[in-house]
Amino acid sequence: MIRLTLLFAAIPAFLMAGCSAPNTEPNRPALPPLADLTAYHIVDPSTDTALSIAQAAAALSDADVVFLGETHRHPGNHLAQMALLRALHEKHSDTALSLEQFERDVQTIVDQYLSGDIGEATLREKGRAWDNYPVSYRPLVEYAKENGLAVIASEAPNMVVRCVGRQGPDFLATLPADKQHWSALTLRLEDGPYKDRFVEFAVGNAGHGKSTGEDDTVSAAVLRSFAAQVTRDETMAQSIVQYIDANPGHRVVHLNGSFHSAGFLGTAERVMWDRPDLEVAVVHPIEVADPNNPEIPEDLRGEGTLLLLIQPEPKSYVSDDEERDAIIAQMNFRKSVDCEL
């Protein structure tokens, strides 16, 4: 059995990379340095023991659903995902790959690629593949294709998510009948650790408390943003559960941004709410504070069944002003994009 722990609200791992508490446990072994951005350690957080891929797959082998959280575009993170998918499939031939990186309305395109009816250029164009598809997700999809694994396009279309972010959750009731299968239509938006975590992140990112010019509407905007986030979570969870319902006994390996599954919240908790009989595991990435002495921040030990320690990526911004300006520009761009549905 995999022990599941729902955490209190905490700042996401990628915001905590510089806040690691020193390792005060005398019996916990020191981990080898992370030599470069392709290096990683998969660690059992109960012991700080680094596991081989085979050992990690064995630790995850009882799970019906394994969430592989990611820091998008991190090479070490993506290398670990590929290795874990292969090892988990070797243990369970009935494994499916579920991807946040493809949206529900392009499932037919994904299936056509897997069956050899279209080429990769068509998959990338008509399937709206992410721009980092060749280096980040191509290896996993090609492995699935070569080995006959189902690939689940699990995410709600971005156009739907954007409309929810603009108009609020009531927008989903207005989806035309022929598009209602694109998204989960019921959102669980109640207060709780996940909402607390999201609001803390969203408010903290709004210029670190500095004015963004939206002081009188930020609360409503954050709540709409949370509804948009939950639209993603509910749709991915529903996609996973629907696949397992249709294929009893199959296992699912699901890739998503780490926020969607950190602390067994977000998408992961919705799978557990809908199918409490399923075993759920989470592999959560943490960008360490010191690659030469990688340690697990004490308050992040419960973020996953296993933790993936990786080097921090280069800083996106070196000052609060630089980050604030980028956030304001992004917010202004989002306000300029109309709902397309």
Image: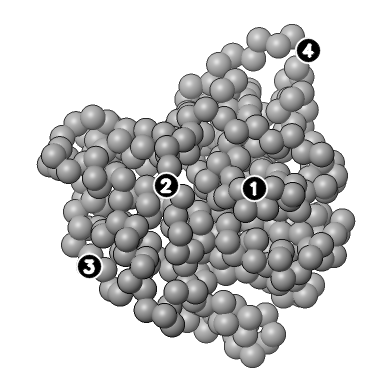
Q: Nearer the viewer, residue 82 or 234?
A: 234
At numbered mark 1, what does the secondary structure look like: helix, strand or loop? helix
- Residue where numbered disc 4 is placed: 27
- Residue where numbered disc 2 is placed: 189
The number of numbered badges drawn on the structure is 4
Q: Where is residue 154, by image quadrant?
A: bottom right
Q: CA distance from mark 3 to mark 1?
A: 34 Å
- Residue where numbered disc 1 is placed: 272
Q: CA distance from mark 3 to mark 2?
A: 24 Å
Mark identifier at residue 181: none
Report crowding for label 2: few under 14, some 14 to 19, many 20 or more residues within 10 A (C-alpha). some
Q: Nearer the viewer, mark 3 or mark 2?
A: 2
Q: Nearer the viewer, residue 212 or 104?
A: 104
Q: Nearer the viewer, mark 3 or mark 1?
A: 1
Q: Position of residue 252 (x, y in %)?
A: 71, 59
Q: Earlier in the sequence, mark 4 or mark 3?
A: 4
Report crowding for label 4: few under 14, some 14 to 19, many 20 or more residues within 10 A (C-alpha). few
For badge 2, the amino acid type reads: Leu
Asked whether residue 157 appears in the rendered view, the answer is: yes
**Residue at 83% from the left image edge and 48% from the top image edge:** 61
Q: Earlier in the sequence, mark 3 or mark 1?
A: 1
Asked whether residue 318 appears in the rendered view, the answer is: no
Q: Is residue 194 left or right of residue 120?
A: left
Report crowding for label 3: few under 14, some 14 to 19, many 20 or more residues within 10 A (C-alpha). few
Q: CA distance from mark 4 to mark 2?
A: 42 Å
Q: Quadrant of the N terminus?
A: top right
Mark identifier at residue 338: 3
